[in-house]
Amino acid sequence: MAVIPVALGGRSYDVTIEPGCVLKGFAAKARPYFEQYHPQDGAKHRKVPFVGDTNTYRLFREPIEQSLEAENFAAEWFVVEPGEGAKSWAVLEKLCDWLLGLGVTRSDHVFAVGGGIVGDLVGFACAITKRGCGFVQVPTTLLAQVDSSVGGKTAINTRAGKNLIGAFHQPSAVLIDPLVLDTLPPREMRAGYAEVLKYGLLGDTAFFDWLEANGGKVLAREPDDLAHAIATSIRAKARIVAEDERETSGVRALLNLGHTFGHALEAETGFSDKLLHGEAVATGMVLAARYSARRGDMSHDDAERTAKAIGEAGLPAEIAAMGLACDGARLVDHMRHDKKMEGGTLPFLLLNGIGKAYLARDVDLEDVAAFLDEQLQAH
Ligand code: GLY
């Protein structure tokens, strides 16, 4: 078991990584966050609110409820359809009405059982319901476990773009059971692994070296290797979030390595299943590494080492192989619509080497378009 603190003063919380903490002994771990739902003498027995999607409801409702019932608690579920459609005004409204109907108070906790979509939606609903009630993240994908469940970014999507309406609202706890990943489809596992590789690439050369040697075992869900990869990723994220909770100093922006190039690829493929977010980040990291090498910031050998680590994980390393019907200028246009644009320029996360990400504010978008044209034709 590992307990990793996220040190944020009055908003501090722990991330607990423990095999079985969801599938085998949920109530034992989560009880501090639903103790107040226990029937007191004469008080009404309130049900503990859980939110999941149809997949997580099907997979995890039974073990969670059995464990609650053994201690005389009961659960009530709000279930959404899987996919980005859940991060909408319409679903948010229904969820907030449901929470109000349950009589949720500011000191209550709502449990988000799912991937990043469920976590983002529930976190935002809890940020605005009663001007802020508590929530606990129970992430069930590798991507959510190593990235989105930690750090308090919550949001929904609108017609204007993804994650443009949201709030920073920290969870009260994050409960991670690596065993829930046993039922995660391999493609989703690889997409989450891209974010694991990101932590090595952005700031931890030794971790990148370790992943080069052991990534196959992480993807095969070998318990010790998987737990080590999750814990190392979360320690890195916790350090960064503690330093720059609201992404104002540039430190938290490092977590966006691969995301600007990746965002353009996601936009070009319609934010669809054609390219999952983690896959886009993977390709985006290859592009960031190769663009850094083109600028002379990093060696071409290290850029190709990055591409190899991503390709060997079964993630898309080459945009030329994606069958995109676009040129570099069109991809750069997508980047211009990214919310990270600052006063006419776009800050880029680039690399001075493996484990050495930095924020470049002097990137010429015409040059990026020319580079992308080369990449689209290469290999
Ligand atoms: N996923 C990026 C961040 O949490 O800042």
Image (cartoon, rainbow, N blue to C red):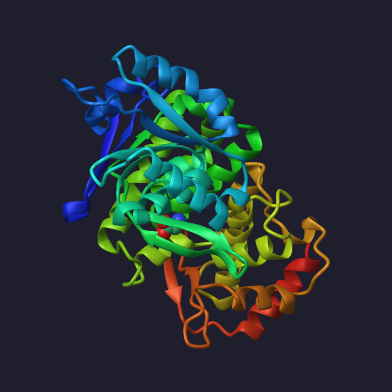
Q: In the image shown, does 370 or 172 lie closer to the viewer?
A: 172
* Quadrant position of the N terminus in the picture: top left
**Residue at 65% from the left image edge and 50% from the top image edge:** 276
Against 122, residue 62 (above or below) is: above
User: Residue 182 location in percent, x, y?
Assistant: 54, 24
- As drawn, the residue found furthest toward the front would be 42
User: Residue 146 location in percent, x, y?
Assistant: 43, 44
**Residue at 36% from the left image edge and 22% from the top image edge:** 74
**Residue at 49% from the left image edge and 27% from the top image edge:** 180
User: Residue 101 location in percent, x, y?
Assistant: 40, 41
Against 51, residue 83 (above or below) is: below
Does residue 314 appear anywhere in the picture?
A: yes
Quarter of the render that holds ligand 1: bottom left
Answer with the quarter of the image where residue 21 lies.
top left
Answer with the quarter of the image where residue 252 lies.
bottom left
- As drawn, the residue found furthest toward the bottom would be 344
Q: In the image shown, does 78 or 150 lie closer to the viewer?
A: 78
* Quadrant position of the C terminus in the picture: bottom right
Q: In the image shown, does 101 or 201 lie closer to the viewer?
A: 101
Left or right? Give the position of 69 relative to 35.
right
Against 369, residue 111 (above or below) is: above
Q: In the image shown, does 37 or 22 lie closer to the viewer?
A: 37
